[in-house]
Image (cartoon, helix red, strand yellow):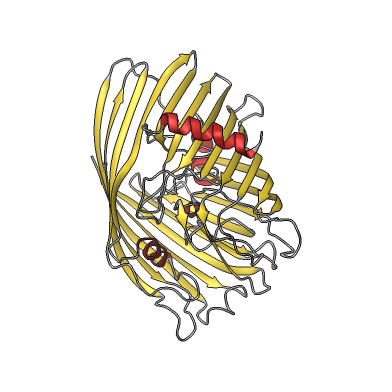
Amino acid sequence: MTRHTMRRIVTAAVLLAAGGPAFAQSTAPPPATQSSTTWSARNWTRLELWSFFEPSIGGGDHEYAYPANRLQLGVRRVARRYELAAAMQYVQFGNLPDNAVGPGPLGLGAVYFAHAGRSDSRQVYLRYLNARINDVLPGVAVQVGRMPYSSGGEAASADPKIQAVKLQRVEARLVGEFDWSLYQRGFDGIRVNVTRPAWSVTAAGLMPTQGGFEDAAGLMMPGVRVLAANVSFRPGRVIPRTEWQLFALHYDDDRDVSARPDNSGRAASRADVAITTLGTAAVAASAPRDGRQWDGLLWIAAQAGSWYDEPHRALSVAIEGGHQWMDAPGRPWLRGGYLHASGDGDPGDARHGTFFQMLPTVRRYAQTASYSQMNHTDLFVQAIARATASLGVRVDVHRVGLASARDAWYSGSGATQARGATFGFSTRPSHGARHLGTTLEGSVDYALTPRWSVNAFLGMVRGGPVVRPAFPGRTLTFGYLENVVQF
């Protein structure tokens, strides 16, 4: 399939569905026997605090705090043969820093300000609007409109442990809603699900909306087109107590953006990226025995295509394992693993080797929001406990590096605007080093009532040789406090 043909197929599918929107879950529940209409309201209020790596004298403001609020109002109609969903969203910031640059953005407040050009960035926009037709054929459902999409999460698992690992460590690695950012992103397009007892298949043609850090959120980005396919085999159908996935994603980008995030040093008048990713994921979990349970994850993605004027070849691999003490107080769950995402070892040759993360929800895998899984290595251990039904605690330690010292330090979460000077990923030089830093991260979530919860996060990065030449200050600190109310 040529790039031109692929563009025509995705564009036609998306424009056909363009009025429509999405459901707030990645896998729809069984069709209802009776019709019902549900109205919902959810409000997030967040205070973010940044102390980025201190820049040299004359650099920007690296210490600041800002409040933000996101209000979502939605309605959902469920019937036996169809489902309709719509949601509007309003985002409001205050006190975004206007001088937090140098070198590069000093934290996410600077990125929000750069997109909006004002300290009180705000917008009201269409978050979701979609229709789903159930049983078009037996076990076949079609969804059109503006919808959520999360790669790796196309089908929910009936095994609670496997589903927990998928939610935390598989979903949205490559394509996701950028859901922690205030503006988020949605997808305009069409999605088809085929469900059978042993397996399920999802195919989709999508265009992401503007969002993430972009205040002109909710506008379609026709310059970015994604074809996605996923086959999920239910636990035990192929490998005992293991859910196995095969996935394919094709990303095509010809937006009118002038940034080119790589190590070549070459300028670009517009984006010119066409990359196909093929991969597999296997998530395993043992049966609980003697109050204990283990889990494991293997995730592999290989890429080929073109990156501007160069052929592209890249690879990423993640291997993880965990063990939970089911009968101990707090049910502690200890996990660890390693990820490698290839980098480009020679900026002067005619090949691009940096793994391209496309449209991920980066903060799910990098809670300090200071790096992306491109030219990246990550050795980590985490501990999760739930002291009570209402109180959860998580602590992570990561040793983060670059796969190639001749490539860049990448950050970002993919395309945020249809045109301009921002690609969606940005780079900082490696200074010929590989150790980016060591992170210590902790989070707490507490449900005061079924409709009211509070969560807090604090993360610290101790910069390594990649950071030190550009920043005299070696410590980055990022924290937030968030209040969530829903009805």
In the image, 325: left or right of 76? right
- The residue depicted at 52 percent of the width and 45 percent of the height is 224
- The residue depicted at 48 percent of the width and 61 percent of the height is 421
Outermost residue toward the bottom in this view:
57
Image height of 196 relative to 129, above or below: above
- The residue depicted at 40 percent of the width and 67 percent of the height is 110
Q: Where's residue 398, x and y in %?
A: 56, 61
Observer able to see residue 125: yes
Q: Where's residue 126, x and y in %?
A: 32, 41
Quadrant of the rendering where the N terminus is positioned: top right
In the image, 284: left or right of 16? right
Between 78 and 429, the residue placed more toward the observer is 429
Observer able to see residue 45: no
In the image, 308: left or right of 349? left
Between 423 and 73, the residue placed more toward the observer is 423
Outermost residue toward the top in this view:
138
Locate residue 267: give its quadrant.
bottom right
Q: Where's residue 187, x and y in %?
A: 44, 39
Between 3 and 429, the residue placed more toward the observer is 3
Locate residue 380: give its quadrant.
bottom right
